[in-house]
């Protein structure tokens, strides 16, 4: 009976393997005529022919199909034609041949009332024909954005520069202004997103929002991470903070709010908002609004929602990858199944092995508890220093203690950066993961630019450190007690 079951499973595995190999081919032949992304968004006419001419030999071989659209090096740039068809023939359109982009593809500036800043922007002509481009500032930022030129020519495969001056008046309303500079060439339109945050000079609160690189371009349904710092110039207060994802039309796609204790000085924290599955592609902002009393303070940062386009091509792309993954998974399952039957015949000292593993876990828990306790003792010594200010040497010593703790607790090399540590913590399964990541970000933003660090600021950092370490102490302590209890039970059984 066992032999027949084993034969059935092996036969089923080989059938599934054959299906996984043939599936990419079937999908390819089913969808081979789908347009590729380059066909959908093409701005130059492309055809696949057997080339019987040489492009670049300074001779325009029109007899073999060489033309200005296929080889402008030999035949020159095609003339711009806007003529329509006569009779039954079709006219040519220049809009498909025009292509350009803004460099950079986004402008984001923080300005105080009565200040200005000039940004240099390039229009890069990535097509093969010359064109004239017209620029227009959207209504949302028209009163704050001024261009040194609104219309100019751009040669094929060349770039032209213009300047955008972002300027605020002394009585400009503080807030976030999100708009764009629209460029039109022929019937092709592109937009350069512009985000301007206007701050009041001498405001008691300054809100600063940044989006890490991994969240600057996302797909629908993914979450956006906002790294937020609220600078409090008053005293310890409580404030209402709202977080929103919105577009240029101020349509909100997700939001939440919190009442936070804001200490004097910098208050760093991280918030995460999820986008909807049906959110349209485009540029959006992570908007933060702090309300204290009757006054509100704002800032925002931009991110992009993009929909990756994939299709079955010459290498089957996604379908081939899925087929290969299924193939290898089934091969592994079949190998494990066959190997497992052979291994059942062997006798292994399972009980002894289990005891060894549990003893190793017990020793590891004890080591972790010692590490946490010793680190807590070192941090408490810092709190006993009777100084009004801390020097950089004190900060360096503190960072050395914490770096030693993280490297041993998370089994890292001692020479890591804080960004590497955050990435490592986010990839492993561990208790209090989010709290550890937020804490590391606080350490990373220690104000090194000062000659001396105020004692109250450093004490807050030490208190946060002790809070985190005490959480680890409870987690590791429970694990140690549990392992010790198991060891006592085993000793009684042996006796």
Image (cartoon, rainbow, N blue to C red):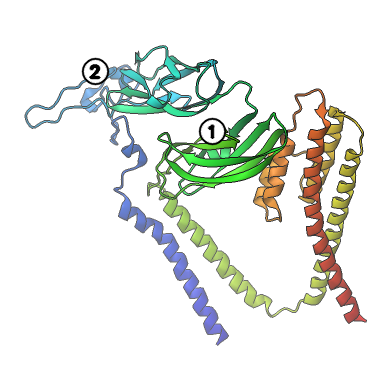
Of 384 and 294, which appears nearest the observer? 294
Q: Residues within 10 Å of mark 2 (few under 14, many from 20)?
A: few
Question: Callout 2: helix, strand or loop?
Answer: loop
Residue name at image x 32 percent, y 34 percent: 42
Q: Residue at label 2?
A: 79
Q: Position of residue 372 (x, y in %)?
A: 84, 51
Residue furthest to the front in view is 294
Observer-side mark, 1 or 2, equals 1
Quarter of the rendering occupied by the C terminus:
bottom right
Q: Is residue 218 above or below residue 107?
A: below
Q: Position of residue 16 (x, y in %)?
A: 46, 68
Residue furthest to the left in view is 87
Residue name at image x 69 percent, y 80 percent: 345
Q: Position of residue 193 (x, y in %)?
A: 44, 28
Residue furthest to the bottom in view is 1
Q: Is residue 164 visible?
A: yes
Sequence-earlier tag: 1 or 2: 2
Q: Residue at label 1?
A: 300
Residue name at image x 19 percent, y 22 percent: 82
The CA distance from mark 1 to mark 2 is 45 Å
Q: State the count of labels.
A: 2
Quarter of the rendering occupied by the N terminus:
bottom right
Q: Position of residue 89 (x, y in %)?
A: 11, 30
Of 64 and 238, which appears nearest the observer? 238
Of 483 and 309, which appears nearest the observer? 483
Q: Is residue 445 above or below residue 315?
A: above
């Amino acid at each position: 009976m066992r032999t027949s079951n084993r034969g059935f499973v092996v036969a089923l595995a080989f059938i599934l393997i054959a299906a996984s190999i043939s599936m990419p081919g079937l999908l390819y032949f089913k969808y081979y005529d789908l347009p590729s992304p380059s066909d959908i968004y093409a701005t130059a006419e492309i055809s696949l022919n057997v080339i019987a001419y040489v492009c670049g030999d300074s001779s325009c071989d029109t007899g073999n199909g060489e033309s200005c659209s296929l080889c402008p090096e030999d035949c020159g740039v095609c003339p711009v034609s806007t003529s329509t068809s006569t009779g039954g023939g079709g006219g040519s359109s220049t809009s498909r041949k025009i292509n350009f982009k803004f460099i950079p593809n986004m402008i984001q500036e923080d300005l105080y009332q009565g200040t200005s800043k000039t940004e240099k922007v390039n229009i890069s002509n990535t097509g093969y024909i010359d064109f004239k481009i017209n620029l227009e500032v959207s209504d949302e930022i028209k009163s704050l954005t001024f261009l040194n030129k609104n219309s100019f020519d751009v040669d094929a495969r060349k770039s032209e520069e213009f300047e955008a001056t972002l300027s605020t008046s002394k009585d400009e309303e503080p807030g976030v202004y999100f708009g764009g500079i629209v460029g039109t060439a022929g019937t092709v339109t592109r937009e350069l997103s512009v985000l301007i945050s206007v701050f009041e000079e001498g405001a008691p609160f300054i809100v600063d929002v940044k989006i890490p690189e991994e969240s600057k371009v996302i797909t629908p349904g993914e979450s956006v991470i906002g790294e937020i710092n609220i600078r409090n110039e008053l005293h310890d207060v409580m404030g209402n903070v709202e977080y929103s994802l919105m577009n240029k039309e101020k349509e909100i796609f997700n939001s939440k709010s919190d009442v936070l204790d804001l200490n004097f000085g910098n208050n760093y924290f991280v918030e995460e908002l999820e986008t909807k599955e049906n959110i349209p592609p485009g540029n959006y902002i992570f908007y933060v609004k702090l309300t204290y009393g009757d006054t509100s303070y704002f800032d925002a940062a931009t991110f992009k929602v993009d929909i990756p386009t994939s299709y079955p091509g010459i290498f089957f792309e996604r379908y081939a990858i899925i087929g290969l993954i299924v193939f290898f998974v089934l091969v592994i399952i079949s190998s494990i199944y066959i190997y497992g039957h052979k291994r059942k015949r062997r006798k292994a000292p399972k009980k002894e092995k289990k005891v060894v593993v549990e003893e190793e876990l017990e020793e590891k828990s004890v080591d972790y508890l010692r590490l946490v306790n010793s680190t807590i003792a070192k941090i408490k010594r810092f709190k006993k220093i009777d100084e009004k200010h801390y020097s950089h040497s004190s900060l360096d010593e503190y960072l050395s203690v914490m770096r030693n703790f993280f490297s041993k607790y998370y089994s890292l090399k001692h020479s890591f950066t804080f960004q590497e540590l955050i990435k490592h913590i986010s990839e492993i399964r561990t208790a209090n993961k989010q709290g550890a990541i937020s804490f590391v970000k606080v350490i990373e933003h220690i104000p090194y630019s000062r000659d001396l660090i105020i004692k109250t600021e450093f004490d807050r950092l030490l208190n946060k450190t002790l809070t985190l370490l005490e959480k680890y102490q409870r987690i590791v302590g429970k694990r140690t007690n549990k392992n010790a209890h198991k060891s006592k039970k085993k000793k009684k059984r042996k006796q």
